[in-house]
Image: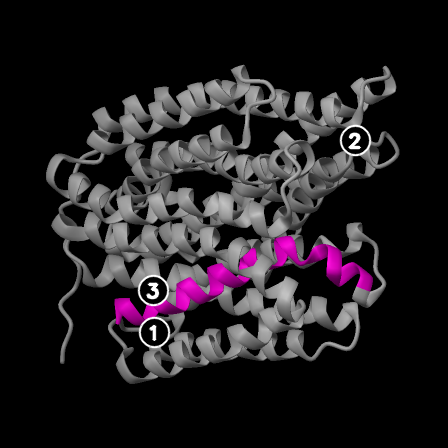
Amino acid sequence: MITALLAATFVVVLAATVMTVAIPPLTHDLSVPATSAQWLTTGYMLTMAIVIPVMAFLARRFRLRPLYTTAMSLFLAGTLLSATAPAFETLLIGRVVQATGAAIITPLMLTTVATLVPTAVRGRTMGGITLVMAVAPAVGPTVSGLVVDALGWRALFWLTLPIAAAAFVFGLLVVRDVTEPKPARFDLVSALLSATGFSGVIVGLARLGGTASSNSAPAAWASLAVGVMALALFTRRQLRLGDRALVDLRTFRSPGFATGVALLALTMIGLFGALLLLPLYLQEVRGLTTAQTGLALLPGGITAGVLAPIVGRISDRHGPGAALLPGAIVLSATFWTLAATDHAPYGWAIAAHILLNVGIAFLITPLFTVGLNATPTTLSPHASAILNTVQQVAGAAGGALLITVTSTVASHLTAGGASQRIAIATGIHGGFLTAAIVSLSGIGLAVGLARSTRPRTEEPIETRR
């Protein structure tokens, strides 16, 4: 069952990353500006951030097999619609339908792991999940660049379709119901507040990170303000509803869970920011093509995939602190090295990306393990929803933050007479410096988490054959 869910997760994570290098040919083919085409990625992320909190309710109210069937059916329908889209608007709708299915699959996998896998060996299972979540983003841009150059952007969806269909059929053969649904009340007000809050935050961050223009800044900040206010009201309502909450915030009563979520957010800020800055550096400063950039970043993703199962075993044997602190130190050291190196050759950028993924591998697996272990099984759907939502929103925040710093520095230098290449290189240097400063907080959180985390005593439920 977990293998089937991992296969489905690989497909949906791959679909989230393949569009990044397809934007230029797509804008020409469908006659849309690049700012509009970027919503094919931002809209995917936004949809997941809206749907994932609702997943906590769905996991309690419905059985596993119908949820899996619905999720993969939506993903397949969105993929087919995207492949045959006659216009940009249809393509965007297809991506939203895709993301709706994807938003159900990933939390469903974590909830199933929390239900079936004993705490003592959960780290190695999470290592397999991290392997999938590391390899898919690494392979995505590489494969996408090669496919788009040879067959065009529609081939990305046509090639995804049979892979997703195979994963769907495999899941139908092995996925069975392992939890009993319970009566649950769907709170529409909470859902609307959640959707408004996450939409405002992600749209604001996307606008803020997409340009340094002062004309767009007021709209970006207004969107952020609305999003933050809605999330504050959402939080207050969840605390008042108690057991009837859409997302039960009692998970944060565990110091291990709260600290783990904070460290996960900082890790995602650095990771997604670096995933935007390194390709920008390789293409705009070093002059690599899209396909060359994808190949240059492939070793780092493979490194994270190879290390993930090893880190899972280390976490099971010696506790999460044995992996968390080294991961936070390596991640921070990589950012500081990148910030201190101007105009480095592309070979050093590849090496830095490998080191970055070493740090990520030592962080992600223990963090998700800690997040699930710190909460009782009854709260696992809520814990997985929170972890996945934080991952999406923090990733958007990291990309926006570092791109905004880069754009601002580059625009000031360009206005002062610097060449475009020098301005972008210096701006990227400023972005990595920002990430390095943020990463220092991660080391402190890793130290605290290693000291405070305790194994949970509640074991997963028994399942019947």
Against 220, residue 463 (above or below) is below
- Residue 382 visible, this orientation: no
Distance of mark 1 from mark 2, alpha carbons?
Answer: 45 Å
* Mark identifier at residue 6: 3
Q: Is residue 274 visible?
A: yes
Say if the magenta span includes residue 23.
yes
In percent of width and height, residue 106 lies at: 41, 60
Where's the N terminus, which quadrant? Answer: bottom left
Please provide the residue range marked out in magenta: 1-28
Residue neighbourhood size for the residue with mark 3, other residues' Cα within 10 Å, grouped as few (<14), some (14–19), many (≥20) = many
The vertical placement of 165 against 35, above or below, is below
Q: CA distance from mark 3 to mark 1?
A: 15 Å
The kind of residue on which mark 3 rests is: Leu
Disc nearest the viewer among 3 and 1: 3
Q: Amino acid at mark 2?
A: Ala
> Which is more foreground, mark 1 or mark 2?
2
Mark 2 lies on residue: 212
The answer to whether mark 3 and mark 2 are in CB contact below 8 A is: no
